[in-house]
Amino acid sequence: MSYCRMNGEDSDIYLYNDITNGRICMSCPMIGDGEGHVLMPNAKDAIAHCKKHRELGHKVPAYAFTRLREEAKEEAIKQKKWMKEFFAMVKKNDKKKKDRMRREKPKIDKIMKQLEKSSTNKQG
Ligand SMILES: [Zn+2]
C-alpha cells in the first residue's frame, strides 16, 4: 500500500509499505539520478526521510506524514512493550546473579581476610 505516489500534483516521491521489508522510497530523487530506492524499516526513519525531501523542495503530501506518524506511534507502543518485557527478564537474571553473589560472599570474606593478613604481615 502506498503512502503517496509521484503524481505531478502534491507528491514528488513514491513511498510505499512493503510488509516484509518496511517503507520504500522508490526511485528516490535524493539518490543519484533517481534510480535508487531507499529502504526504511521504521516509520520514524521514513518521517525523517520525507522531511529531508521537503527541505530540498520536493513535494510530500501531508496525508503521507499523517499515516507515518500513526504508524510511528504504534511502533513506539510496541517498542515500549518489548522494552518492558526485556527489562523484566533482565531483572529476573539480576535476582539470580544476586543470589549467586550472596552464596559466594563467604568466600570473598575469606579472601579479603587473607589479603588483610598478608598486607599486615608485610607491614609488620
Ligand atoms: Zn526518498
Image (tube, rainbow, N blue to C red):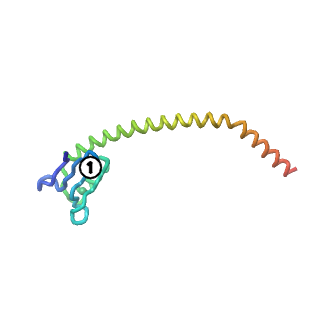
Query: Which residue matches tag 1?
Result: 23
Above or below, comparing residue 91 to residue 119 in the picture: above
**Residue most extreme to the bottom:** 33
Residue in the picture at 23% in, 59% down: 28
Percent x, y of residue 84: 43, 36
Local SS, label 1: strand
Which residue occupies the foreground of this view, 123 or 92? 92
Q: Residue at x 35, y 40 (%)?
A: 76
Query: How many marks are shown on the rendered structure?
Result: 1
Rendered location of residue 107, percent (x, y): 72, 39
Task: Look at the image and tell me in which quarter the N terminus lies.
Answer: top left
Q: Residue at x 48, y 34 (%)?
A: 88
In the rendered image, the residue lying farthest to the right is: 124
Residue 16 percent location from the top left of the image: 21, 49
70 to the left or right of 114? left
Asked whether, in this view, residue 11 is left or right of residue 78, the answer is: left
The image quadrant that residue 29 belongs to is bottom left
Specify whether tag 1 is near ligand 1 (CB below 8 Å): no
- Report the image quarter containing ligand 1: bottom left
- Disc 1 marks which amino acid? Arg
Instruction: Give the x, y percent position of residue 100.
Output: 63, 36
Of residues 87 and 19, which is closer to you in this image? 19
Please tell me which residue is depicted at 31% across the width and 39% down the height of the picture: 74
Q: Say few, some or many: other residues with alpha carbon within 10 Å of mark 1 (under 14 / 14 to 19 / 20 or more).
A: many
